[in-house]
Image: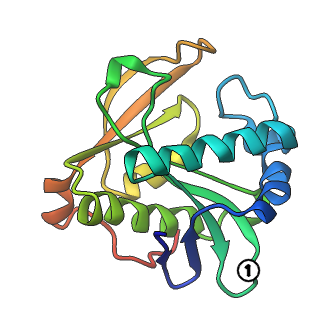
Amino acid sequence: MVTLETPRLILRRWREEDVAPMAAVNADPEVMRWIRDGSVRDERQTRDGIRAWEEEWESHGFGLFAVEIRSTGELAGFTGLSVPHFLPEVLPAVEIGWRLGRSHWGRGLATEAAVAAVRFAFEERGLERIVSIAQVGNEASERIMTKLGMRPVRETVHPTCGRRVRVFELSSEQETRGGFPALGTDG
């Protein structure tokens, strides 16, 4: 079982007790505003999502981590790696993504978690390149991508919802040249 620790977070695999707090994150319209068509998800959909994320861990050796606040044990949301099957034009690729509950926004936690996940991708899994995909207008996610040293490489349309998206990219070569923030960078 892979577990990553940062100054404020624990990134770990999913547990049954994570379903309800993740469902609360997914039920917030403001959190979901930039996800596909903006629809919220219920507990059943969240449980199905967690099951799929765990299956990706088993089949690929990477996946989405549950993000836990070290000081409280509270589930903040997720960050991690997945294959962006929804956007075939960028395949083969591995995407880094994140989703935190609104009470955890604005404190640099998503960046801190993403830095750890990127290091895991390059150093532990030997990936040479990762992408991140955000809907046009999602400035908060684009700021995180920029802090990670990612560069925009294309703009296209999300095939399932018709919204415009930007694809950012980071190579392991960029990361080793020092274009990557130190772990624990605040927001």
Q: Report x, y in % for residue 151.
A: 29, 42
Q: Report x, y in % for residue 33.
A: 73, 35
Q: Residue at x 41, y 68 (%)?
A: 116
Q: Is residue 4 left or right of residue 67?
A: left
Task: Identify the image's colour scheme: rainbow, by chain, secondary structure or one colour.
Answer: rainbow
Observer-nearest residue: 90 or 85? 85
Quarter location, residue 35: top right
Residue 184 visible somewhere in the drawing: yes
Q: Residue at x 53, y 18 (%)?
A: 158
Please determine whether, in this image, residue 8 is positioned above or below residue 118. Answer: below
Q: Report x, y in % for residue 22.
A: 77, 54
Observer-nearest residue: 109 or 69? 69
Check disc 1 and give the amino acid type.
Gly
Q: Is residue 52 left or right of residue 6?
A: right
Please determine whether, in this image, residue 132 is positioned above or below residue 63. Answer: above
Q: Is residue 77 left or right of residue 39?
A: left
Residue 96 visible somewhere in the drawing: no
Q: Residue at x 25, y 59 (%)?
A: 122
Q: Residues within 10 Å of mark 1 (few under 14, many from 20)?
A: few
- Element carrying mark 1: loop
Q: Residue at x 39, y 22 (%)?
A: 155
Seen as rendered, the residue at the extreme front is 58
Q: Give the residue pinned by disc 1.
A: 73
Q: Report x, y in % for residue 141.
A: 53, 47
Quarter location, residue 166: top left
- Picture mark count: 1
